Image: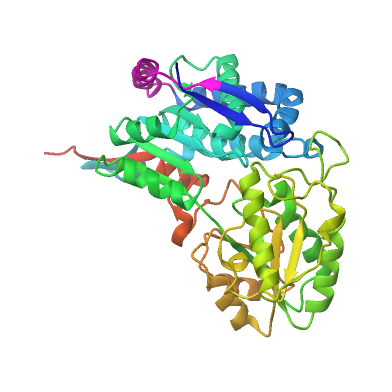
Amino acid sequence: MSDTVKLTSPVDGSIHVERPVASDGEIQAALQRAKAAQAEWVRVPIAERGRYCKAMLEAMVAMKDEIVPEIAWQMGRPVRYGGEFGPFADRVNYMVDIAEEALAPVMVERSEAFRRYVKRDPLGLVFVIAPWNYPYITAVNTIVPALMAGSAVVLKHAAQTLLVGERFQQAFDKAGLPEGLFHNIVLNHAKTEALLGAGAFDHCNFTGSVAGGKAIEKAAAGTFTSLGLELGGKDPAYVRADAKLDHAIENLVDGAFYNSGQCCCGIERVYVDEKVYDDFVDGFASLARGYVLGNPLEEATTLGPMAQAKGADFVRQQISEAVRDGATAHVDTSKYDMDKPGSPYIAPQVLTGVNHQMSVMREESFGPVVGIMKVKDEAEAIHLMNDSPYGLTASVWTSDVEAATRIGEQIETGTVYMNRCDYLDPALVWTGVKDTGRGAALSSIGYEVLTRPKSFHLRIKV
């Protein structure tokens, strides 16, 4: 009997989708087709590659009415938020539009005596291991730039969002992408690791947990496969006394609880100047209490279930441990009938009286909980923001752009925001430090990661 991958819906606990794991023969046939197709694709002009990618975007958007409820069933995001089509389109369009310039050779000398330049060659075969929390935009961050750079792509999507991989395949097929250049393959962990260990790919991009990133590194060890790893986060915010408080509260609440907190760059800890601390906490907690926890297929729901019950139980454990150690919980969760142990449905929670000895302020929660601490000055805020094994994004809320710049230069992070959070700008490189991983995506720098340099030193006069 063949092995299968099952998708358990957080909506009702049912098996929503089940797919067979690809056989060894199917995998090898797909890899052979991809390599053959890539050898032809590299000769296709960049502008023509872009037309295929934009046609894929058009085909994907045409499936919007089916995709939005499909996401809700798979990982719990409420239908009222309409999927990921805005940022998806932004990233596809931007990376296609900059490709000609970003992939152009770097000319060092063009004279009568010499022609010296560095060409950007495609890596060849790119393996994308995509996560379930933002299943479309995290995958497209690598898929489209890799294709634009001249590589072929194999996608292994998360078990929790199996249908997303199929949607990508449908969209590329409808776009008329040459056969073999893109493959969606259903794999289990053992086959994924075996392929990496065999050096089947030239590059692997993985988005997921720190433990998952370590497993990928271990599997690929000794193969010289290049890796891009976007792993955990515990993203902080610092609210200065001169911040526009209503704006900071509204945006930080959304940054903490959107997608049930299941965002790599979501807000998980907030440091607030003592001068505005009380007003900030009151406003923040009041907004948090307004969330409607419920079935994500209902328009009234603003907070759906977490993707998996074990994730919700971990957050409950963090909250109970913090309260036991002296923290104050500002949301009365007794009114949320669906919030109970073993359920993926969990109410938002706001904690004060927290400290960095507590798990909720140090370990990635990846759920709808946030801790808020009072700080006396900028130096204390910077120290606490850096007191973490992670570093993906950090935000500073202030009316002083020079202060934001000064503080940002001292924070150990991949991206610094002023007066916004939980956002990705495709024109800026997406990267992290410390246990958040390594590598880079999007922007012109993202193309550097997805190509290999090849130098040409041509002596004309002899």
Seen in the image, is 151 located left or right of residue 277? left
Does the magenta run of residues contain 379?
no
In this rendering, does residue 418 appear at all?
Answer: no
Tell me which corner region of the image, top left, top right, bottom left or bottom right, holds residue 434.
Answer: bottom left
What residue do we see at 71% from left, 21% from top?
Answer: 62
Image x and y of residue 226, in percent: 34, 42
Depth check: give the residue in front, 208 or 307: 307
Depth check: give the residue in front, 398 or 401: 398
Tell me which corner region of the image, top left, top right, bottom left or bottom right, holds residue 399.
Answer: bottom right
In this rendering, does residue 74 appear at all?
Answer: yes
Residue that lies at the very extreme toward the left in this rendered image: 462
* Residue range corresponding to the magenta coloring: 19-44
Residue that lies at the very extreme toward the bottom in this rendered image: 376
| Quadrant, the N terminus | top left
What residue do we see at 35% from left, 46% from top?
Answer: 217
What residue do we see at 45% from left, 50% from top?
Answer: 211
Residue 96 higher or lower than 44, as above or below:
below
Tell me which corner region of the image, top left, top right, bottom left or bottom right, holds residue 60.
Answer: top right
Residue 418 higher or lower than 4, as above or below:
below
| Quadrant, the C terminus | top left
Seen in the image, is 336 located left or right of residue 403? right
Numbered-mark total: 0
Q: Main secondary structure of the magenta part?
A: helix
Residue that lies at the very extreme toward the front in this rendered image: 341
Image x and y of residue 294, in percent: 82, 42
Image x and y of residue 164, in percent: 60, 28
Depth check: give the residue in front, 430 or 461: 430
Render colour scheme: rainbow
Image x and y of residue 94, in percent: 59, 39
Residue 361 higher or lower than 374, as above or below:
above
